[in-house]
Image: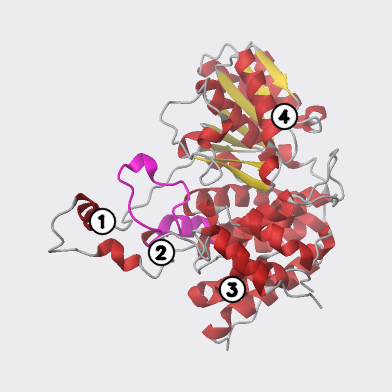
Amino acid sequence: MVKRVSATAVSNLMRMVGSSCSCPAHTAHASALMSSHKGSGGSKRHASVEMARPEYAFEMATSTVRVGSGATQEIGMDAANLRAQRVMVFTDRNIAKLHPLKAVTESLDRAKVNFTVYKDVRVEPSDKSFQHAIAAARAYKPDAIIAVGGGSTMDTAKAANLFTVYKDADLMDFVNAPLGKGRPIDRALLPLIAVPTTAGTGSECTGSAIFDLKDRKAKTGIADRALRPMLGIIDPLNTRSMPQQVRLASGLDVLCHAIESYTAIPYTMRGPAPANPLNRPAYQGSNPISDIWSSKALRMVAESLPKSVRNADDYAAQDAMTLAAAYAGIGFGNGGVHLMHGCSYGISGLNKAYHHPQYQTDHPLCPHGISVAITSPAVAEFTGAMSPDRHLEIAQVLGADVTNAKRDDAGAILADALRRFLFDLGVPDGISAFGFTSSDIEPLVQSILPQKRVLQLSPRESGAEQIASILERSMKNY
């Protein structure tokens, strides 16, 4: 039996950071944005409130993608077509020994393109590892960048690209508020080609770069459409070397990208429209186009992830997962994610000892996809009332019989479907499997609450008390 976190502890947290999300979509005073304030004397303050307009538009931004078995062999010609003279290739020390990097470097050699390889990408990057990569890029002064690896490599390459162009900027200048300054990117970045070697993050299609901010014990990142790669090369041959647990973790990330994007707050309810479209966030809320990509990705994951995890030789399932990752990347890259990802940042950021099997790292590691999926049942129970039809649709895709289901039970039905799905795949039993206890809930909540960029997309108010409850219910899932 999990001990409930004390009301005093939650109350203290609520006073520290606010008891709920402050975005207009969740506050009881949302209608104030639309108030006319006539007869107020015409003050400038009242005039600005009167002119505030709720969001009315959404944008779709994604990378060009090239899909095909063996498509990596064309990357040298891509670099030559860009007239690149100094290409910087980013990878990690595991991928550096495998086929994907060899395919890239051989193609660059054939095209007679000069390049260097940076092999020090950290799996689950930190601010320190980002800074190391940025310093290397600034010293080399590339005119094009190639990322060969999973989300960690692609995100590291995005950060190196950004700060090679913004030579005098500090890392925190562009980090999402409130942890950073949230500065928008207003210059053209270098051409970036992403070559994913996992089927999960969808980072080849998105403008996000995520890392651990060690001194704040929080995971955060930079999110801006300008960060997205110019080209993503989705070559199924590059995912053949994934160990089973990497296939599992990366696939669960796809699952949660699809679910969260599909159940996020509608873009029209996110808050006021930006005064300048440059300031419209990359994560905008659910919208009609993201819904299509996320819904399709969900169905592909439900069918192909179990096959991919159970059989290393099921190449059809693995190929389907590479596409599902990109589909979900397009969906959540514009629609956004919310509580599953928000909670995961605290879970992985505060992990002190857990080391997931088959991950070759020199530091404790709870893989991103595992840390995201672990709270998915509790989050589904929490959000179900806000879009019951969508929750029942997802549950049905995951195998639940919803023939006589009541809409009031949508969250519980989806939660049960997720528990069965995770159990069948051998996912650890709740956050207690990572060493967390009830005494860790308060620091976890403190680490999660600053994730405003994603928490504000939750369809329900998600302050300290609500997040503590989700974590309590995620201690054990089965």
Helix, strand or loop at disc 2?
Answer: loop
Circle nearer the N terminus (3, 2): 2
Q: Is residue 54 above or below residue 178?
A: below
Q: Looking at the picture, which amino acid does disc 1 mark?
A: Val
Q: Which mark is residue 382?
A: 3
Q: Residue at x 63, y 60 (%)?
A: 340
Hey, which quadrant is residue 106 in on the image?
A: top right
* Discs 4, 2 touching: Cβ within 8 Å: no
What is the CA distance from the residue labelled 1 to the residue labelled 3?
33 Å
Circle nearer the N terminus (1, 4): 1
Looking at the image, is mark 4 or mark 2 nearer the viewer?
2
What is the CA distance from the residue labelled 3 to the residue labelled 2?
17 Å
- The crowd level at tag 2 (other Cα within 10 Å; few <14, some 14-19, many 20+) is many
Q: Which mark is residue 25?
A: 2
Q: Tell me the residue that label 1 is attached to.
A: 49
What is the CA distance from the residue labelled 1 to the residue labelled 4?
48 Å
Q: Looking at the picture, which amino acid does disc 4 mark?
A: Thr
Report whether residue 255 is seen.
no
- Direction from residue 229 to residue 357 in the image, left or right: right
Q: Which stretch did the figure color magenta?
A: 269-296
Q: Tell me the residue that label 4 is attached to.
A: 91
Looking at the image, is mark 3 or mark 4 nearer the viewer?
3
What is the CA distance from the residue labelled 2 to the residue labelled 1?
16 Å
Circle nearer the N terminus (1, 3): 1
Q: Residue 26, percent across and down?
A: 44, 66
Circle nearer the N terminus (2, 1): 2
Q: Is residue 167 above or below residue 148?
A: above
Q: Is residue 272 magenta?
A: yes
